[in-house]
Image: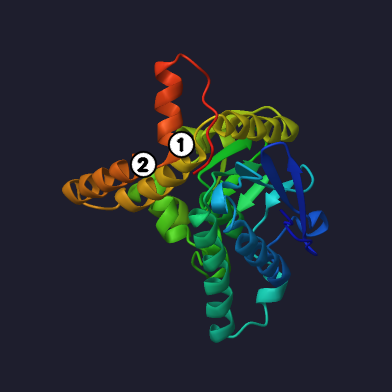
Amino acid sequence: MDFGSYETLLVEQDGPALVVTVNRPAAMNALAGQVVEDLWNLTEVLAHVGEEGDWPIRGVIVTGAGEKSFVAGADIREMEGMSPEDGERYSRRMQDVTLRLEALPVPVVAAVNGFALGGGCELAMACDFIYASRNAKFGQPEVNLGLVPGFGGSVRLTDRVGVGMARELVFTGRTVPAEEAHRIGLVNALFDTPADVVAGAKAVVAEMAAKSPVAIRLSKRLVEQAGPLPTAEGLDLEAGVFGQAFGTEDKAEGVRAFVAKDKPAFPGR
């Protein structure tokens, strides 16, 4: 599968993982307009992973170049001359990127090194889960600029850490270290160095690659859609997706292998 080439992204396949690196280290990997467009175009390509049972990758890792920053935030210099209409367009385009990441048929892991502030924190939260090195720092500092979160922070931060903590972080613009981000549930796991966090992300993608790709795709959609629903409605959705899984070749192979005490070879259909 051709994943394309991009001005501000490094895209490299490593076994079952596709490692996507925001590559603007001189600008702390800030989300300039070109970065947003490159991410948008990449997610358009990745939306077709797994079609017809072809699974060239089994997970995506999003990280940032260098050891100082994952993504430091939006590009403040570009924002300086934006009108209200420009700002809304910028917000909606990056929101599209985050929604596309959430909708990908494979898991997406944020491997956060250094600063993940504003748009960087929002990009990380659009991934399925977040691994971080101990030098990582998270926050939504938009109030320091007279702004509000624009790339999903008002929604996803609440989902991750609860409404009270989300309000505190957004209203104060406070930056929290990796250990605190882990304690409040924003981060799944901590690693000693930026290299370790990427290695940890690759390891979890390899672990997931041994599972049914169809079941993971269905589970990803189910958790996203059922979570916000009232319990009864969520359970109804779950039952429907559970039944859908019974019609897949992966289910047949998984059950066969379990009964035969064999290792499954999931066809991805």
Most extreme residue toward the top is 261
Q: Which residue is mark 2?
A: 245
Name the residue rendered at 26%, 50% in the picture. 237
Q: Amino acid at mark 1?
A: Asp
Pick whichever, 33 or 81, lies toward us: 33
x, y (%) of residue 100? 53, 61
Q: Nearer the viewer, residue 263 or 232?
A: 263
Image height of 164 relative to 141, above or below = above
Position of 244 with respect to 40 (left or right) is left
Disc 1 versus disc 2: distance between alpha carbons? 8 Å
- CA neighbours of label 2 inside 10 A, class few (<14), some (14 to 19), many (20+): some
Instruction: State the residue in front, 39 or 268.
Output: 268
Q: Residue 77 occupies which quadrant of the picture?
A: bottom right
Relative image position of residue 181 (x, y in whole percent): 51, 38
Instruction: Classify 76 as above or below 65.
Output: below
Mark 1 touches mark 2? (CB < 8 Å):
yes
Residue at left offset 43%, top offset 54%: 156
Camera-side residue of 246 and 112: 246
Instruction: Name the kind of residue labelled 2 in the image.
Output: Ala
Residue at 80%, 54% in the rendered image: 25
Residue at x 52%, y 70% (from the top left corner)? 147
